[in-house]
Structures are given as C-alpha cells and as structure tokens.
Image: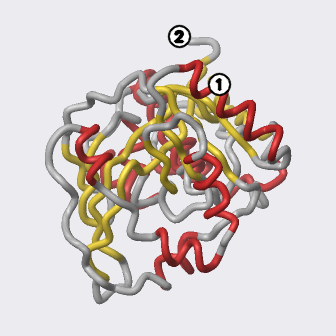
Amino acid sequence: MIALMRESAYAKINLALHVRERRRDGYHLLETLFAFVDAGDTLTAKLADQDSLQTFGPFASNIHNPLDNLVARALAALPRPQGLAVTLEKNLPVAAGLGGGSADAGAVFRMVEELYGLPEDWPSRAAKLGADVPSCVRSEMAIGLGTGTELRAVENDLAGTPVLLVNPSVPRATGPVFKAWDQIDRGPLPTGSARAITLEGRNDLDAPALAQCPVIGDVIEALKNTEAWLARMSGSGATCFALFDTEAQREAAQESIAVAHPNWWMLGGKLR
C-alpha cells in the first residue's frame, strides 16, 4: 500500500472563452478551450482513520474555511474504505481565474483513483463540485461545452509551449463578471487544433472584467510588450497569460515584468 501520495494540482487557464447565451436557470452556455500548466498547488496524502486537511503555502491564509473548500468536498464526494489525511500547499492565488480550487479537487480524484479507482459516475460527482472540476480531474487540454462540464478531445499541438501567468494581486469573483456580460453572442469557438483555436478565438469576458478591474488592461499591455506571440486574460480574470516560442523569451519577460511590477504574482511553466 502506498505510504505517502503526492499530486500536482495543475493551474487551469482558458486559452479561449466564448459565451454563447444565458440559460433560464442563470447559468451561461460556454465554448472554451481548457489548458493546463505544469505547475500549481501541491497535495500530499496518507491513509488515515478519517479524512483531514491541513493547508500551508503563500495563499493558504485566503482559504477562510478549510473544512468547506473543494479538497474537503472532493473527499466527501468519493466513498472509500479508509480516510485520507491531506496536506495542501496553496501556491496559486484564490479567485484568480486559474481554477485553483477545482484543480485541488481534481488532484484528490486522481489520488483516490490510484488507490481504489473511481466510481463510474465520477464525472457527475465532479460536476456537482464545480463546472470545471471534471476537466481538472484529467488536467488535459480539452474543449469544454455547456457550462464547461461537457468535454471534447482536441488536437494538442501546444504541448510544451512556454507560458507565463501574471496576476495583479487582485482577487476577482466570477459571478459579477458573468453578470455584466452584454449577452451578445459573438459566435462559436473556432474549429481545428489547439493552436488554431487559440489564435482565432477570444475571451468574451474581457470587456466586463476590464470595466470592473482596469488593472487587467495593464497586465495585458505588459505581456504584449514582451516577445509573446499571444497575450490574453484567462476566464473571468484577473490572471492573464502569455505564450512564447522559447523558455528564454518567457524568462526574460518574467524578469522585466517583475522589475516593473514587483507586487504582481507570476508563475512560469509549460502547457501540458
């Protein structure tokens, strides 16, 4: 039996996000391209008599109720013969458009899968925790439809692409940004490979997010002033990302932005 397990909760970004319409129940129908960075939170776990959770790390203090966060809820959603004592190193900012809590939940699902396998209805169990949790369980690039829970495979020709994540250290709640969307359907997600969709796609939440948090525009401008071939906001913000041809370009961008904006949070990595 495994004595100590370790899983990465990979940061999730939306390379493109098209909002198609708002349903009567208030949820929005989306078409998005999910991607994952090879860095994020870290979870360790060992078998125990009952489930427990400890948190530490630079953003642990932003988890106001550890017993009600997505790690605890994911544990409760998956029946097992033994408990898991989980330790969460919270490296990703909270309310940042990176799916941090969902990624943590996805890591719990993978731990349970390694130990016992997952129940056949795991996608619905994951979806009850959050619309992006099913995608975070696999943490593989995919097209998300509906509310984000319907996943479709896509040709991943961006694997290994250097990426830089930048957040202006301003938390953003998702609800108000979606509520401020102008409800104009600007068309479907493009077809083709991940690169084609990314280049031809857009983020329909740009305008409402910028109106509520103008510093996002400063982040995008800073990223566009590097050698990135694309810079865009992820999800509802406030985190933005930039894609590069080489790691050297990404590292140079990270260094220059750190000098100009020492209070901004940044994370460099590669797309999975």
State the residue in front, 209 or 137: 209
**Sequence-wise, which precedes: disc 1 or disc 2?**
2
Q: Residue at x 20, y 38 (%)?
A: 193
Mark 1 residue crowding within 10 angstroms, few (<14) / some (14–19) / many (20+) = some
* Number of numbered discs overlaid on the protein picture: 2
* Type of the residue with mark 1: Glu
Q: Residue at x 36, y 46 (%)?
A: 34
* Image vertical order of residue 11 relative to residue 151, above or below: above
Name, please, the residue furthest toward the bottom. Answer: 24
Percent position of residue 61, x then y = 84, 51
Return the residue at label 2: 1
State the residue in front, 151 or 156: 156
| Left or right side of 121 for 259 | right
* Type of the residue with mark 2: Met
Q: Measure the alpha-carbon separation of dots 1 and 2.
A: 41 Å
| Left or right side of 79 for 5 | right
Q: Residue at x 34, y 85 (%)?
A: 183
Nearer the camera: disc 1 or disc 2: 1
Percent position of residue 100, x then y = 59, 47
Percent position of residue 268, x then y = 62, 30
Q: Quadrant of residue 17?
A: bottom left
- Asked whether residue 185 appears in the rendered view, the answer is yes
Return the residue at label 1: 251
Whether pointer 1 and pointer 2 mark residues with C-beta atoms closer than 8 Å, the reply is no
